[in-house]
């Protein structure tokens, strides 16, 4: 992704979801961005709502707070399960993660 594209992405509202079927439970995401990701007692990572509630529905999304964007992107890049998906809210296009173009 070019610098120009990246700048455009950063101007957009983004949301993130985790595919628990592929999560290895290593907890890297929860270390990088504990405000957004948390491991549940089942050993898998889930996203949290802005109200700090664990969202356990399959494919549940939560908004990416702008100050945490870098941490969330790094989580998606480092995720060993390649199962953190960051997408634009406006058109659901994945911008970071295994399905990003
Ligand atoms: S970094 Fe990926 S594989 Fe590791 S706990 Fe988080 S979602 Fe699961």
Image: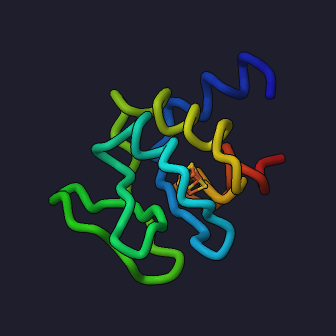
Q: How many marks?
A: 0
48 to the left or right of 77: left
Relative to residue 79, is residue 6 depicted above or below?
above
Q: At x 61% / y 22%, what residue is drawn? A: 7
Residue 75: x %, y % from top left = 55, 39
The colour style of the image is rainbow
Residue 99: x %, y % from top left = 78, 56
Q: Residue furthest bottom?
A: 57
Q: At x 53% / y 76%, what residue is drawn? A: 59
Relative to residue 89, is residue 6 depicted above or below?
above
Residue 30: x %, y % from top left = 40, 45
Q: Residue furthest left?
A: 51
Q: Residue furthest right?
A: 101
Quarter of the image with the N terminus is top right
Q: At x 27% / y 62%, what residue is drawn? A: 49
Residue 89: x %, y % from top left = 50, 57
47 to the left or right of 28: left
> Could you say which is closer to the camera, residue 11 or residue 46?
46
> Could you say which is closer to the camera, residue 22 or residue 88?
22
Q: At x 66% / y 59%, what residue is drawn? A: 83
4 to the left or right of 14: right
> Could you say which is closer to the camera, residue 23 or residue 87?
23
């Amino acid at each position: 992704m070019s610098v120009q594209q990246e700048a455009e992405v950063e101007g957009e509202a983004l949301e993130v979801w985790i595919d628990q079927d592929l999560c290895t439970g290593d907890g890297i995401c929860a270390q990088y961005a504990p405000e957004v990701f948390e491991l549940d007692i089942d050993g898998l990572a889930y996203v949290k709502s802005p109200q700090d509630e664990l969202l356990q529905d399959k494919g549940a999304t939560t908004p990416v707070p702008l100050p945490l964007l870098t941490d969330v992107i790094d989580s998606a890049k480092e995720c060993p399960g390649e199962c953190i998906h960051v997408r634009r809210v406006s058109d659901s296009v994945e911008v970071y993660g295994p399905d990003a173009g």
